[in-house]
Amino acid sequence: MDNHSYNFPSDCTPLTNCKSARKPAGSTVVNMGNAGKNPPRDYLLWSLCNTFYVNFCCLGFMALIYSIKARDQKTLGNLQLAQECSDKAKWYNILAAGWNLLIPLLAVVLIVLLLVHLGSSQGSFDFLGEDGFQNFLKLFSW
C-alpha cells in the first residue's frame, strides 16, 4: 500500500503531528461498584481485646468469629454480607465490653461495701460463731 491511497488532509502526512486530523477524545466511564460508599468495618482488634479479657459467656469469641467473617466477605467483594457480619460483630463487642466493665465494677463495689460494713461497730461478727450466717445475710438487707 502506498501513502496516496489514504485520505489525509493536505497539511498532514502520516508521520507528522497533525492536530487537525485527530478526532476529539470521547469519555470513558468505569463502574467502580460502591466507590462512594465506605466498605464495612470488621472490628477485629476490638474483638480480640474482648476475647482475651474476661470473655463472659463467650461474647468476645462470638464477636471475633463475626469479625473474621466480615473481613473474609469484604475481601471476596460481598459487601452486603460483610455489612451484616460487621453489625453482628459490633453488637457482640458492645455486649462483651459492657460485661467486661460491669463484672469488675460490681466486684469492687461489693468489696468496698463489705469493708465499710465490717469496719463499723455493728457489722463486726464472727463467721464461725452461732449467728455468723445470719449476720452475713444482714449485710445484704436494707
Image (spheres, rainbow, N blue to C red):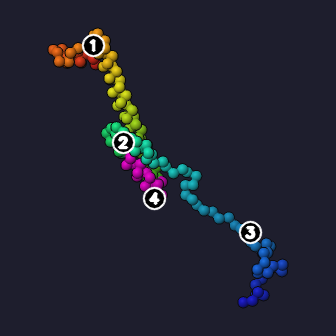
Which quadrant holds the C terminus?
A: top left
Residue found at the very far right of the displayed protein: 11
* Alpha carbon separation for disc pair 1 and 4: 64 Å
Q: Is residue 127 left or right of residue 46?
A: left
Label located before the other in sequence (1 or 4): 4
Vertical placement of residue 32 versus 107, above or below: below
Q: Is residue 140 left or right of residue 127?
A: right
Label located before the other in sequence (3 or 2): 3
User: Mark 1 is on which residue type?
Assistant: Gly
Please state the extent of the stretch shown in magenta in the rendering.
63-79
Residue found at the very far bottom of the displayed protein: 1
* Alpha carbon separation for disc pair 4 and 2: 28 Å
Instruction: Give the labeled residue for mark 2.
Output: 52
Q: Are marks 1 and 4 in contact (CB under 8 Å)?
A: no
Q: Residue at x 78, y 75 (%)?
A: 17
Q: Residue at x 84, y 78 (%)?
A: 11
Instruction: Give the labeled residue for mark 1.
Output: 123
Instruction: Give the labeled residue for mark 3.
Output: 24
Q: How many marks?
A: 4
Which quadrant holds the N terminus?
A: bottom right
User: Mark 2 is on which residue type?
Assistant: Phe
User: Mark 3 is on which residue type?
Assistant: Pro
Magenta-span inclusion, residue 6: no
Instruction: Give the labeled residue for mark 4.
Output: 76
Please tell me how crowded label 2 is: few (under 14), some (14-19), or many (20+) other residues with Cα within 10 Å: few
